[in-house]
Amino acid sequence: GELTGLDIDPSIFNGDDKEVVEDLILAAIKDAQQKAQTKAQEEMAKLTEGLGLPPGMNLPF
């Protein structure tokens, strides 16, 4: 699930815009992935809160 690269057809850009746009897209995707992971952890904490599990116990095993 990790995006490591991106290649956009350079014919649609002027000059060095291609690399800047690729970097911006990669940064946006990584930010979105981090936010999704944080949200998933928060939701899992809500679900497991009432189960009486010890603090810090990570699910799924």
Image: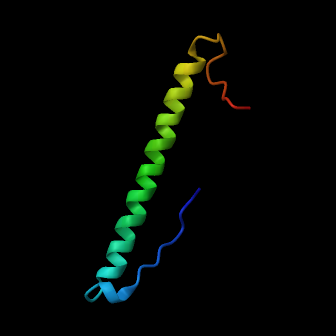
Q: Quadrant of residue 58?
A: top right
Query: In the rendered view, would you say 10 is above or below 36?
Result: below
Determine the residue positioned at 35% across, 66% down.
24
Q: Which of the 4 image quadrants contains residue 54?
A: top right
Location of residue 49 with respect to 42 vertically, above or below: above
Q: Is residue 11 left or right of residue 44?
A: left
Residue 10 as seen in the image, left or right of residue 49: left
Give the residue drawn at x 27%, y 89%.
15
User: In this rendering, would 7 be left or right of 15?
Assistant: right
For this view, does 26 lie left or right of residue 60? left
Can you name the residue that lies furthest to the left here? 14
Which residue is the extreme one toward the right?
61
Q: Quadrant of the C terminus?
A: top right
Q: How is the image coloured?
A: rainbow
Q: How many marks?
A: 0
Q: Position of residue 21 (x, y in %)?
A: 33, 73
Give x and y (percent) for residue 41: 53, 33
Q: Does residue 21 sit above or below 58 in this rendering?
A: below
Q: State the residue in front, 23 or 13.
A: 13
Placement of the N terminus among the 4 image quadrants = bottom right
Q: Which residue is at a point 49% across and 29% down the rendered structure image?
A: 42
What's the residue at 52%, 20% (across, down)? Answer: 46
Residue 11 in the image, given as x and y percentages of width and height = 34, 89
As displayed, is residue 36 above or below residue 47? below
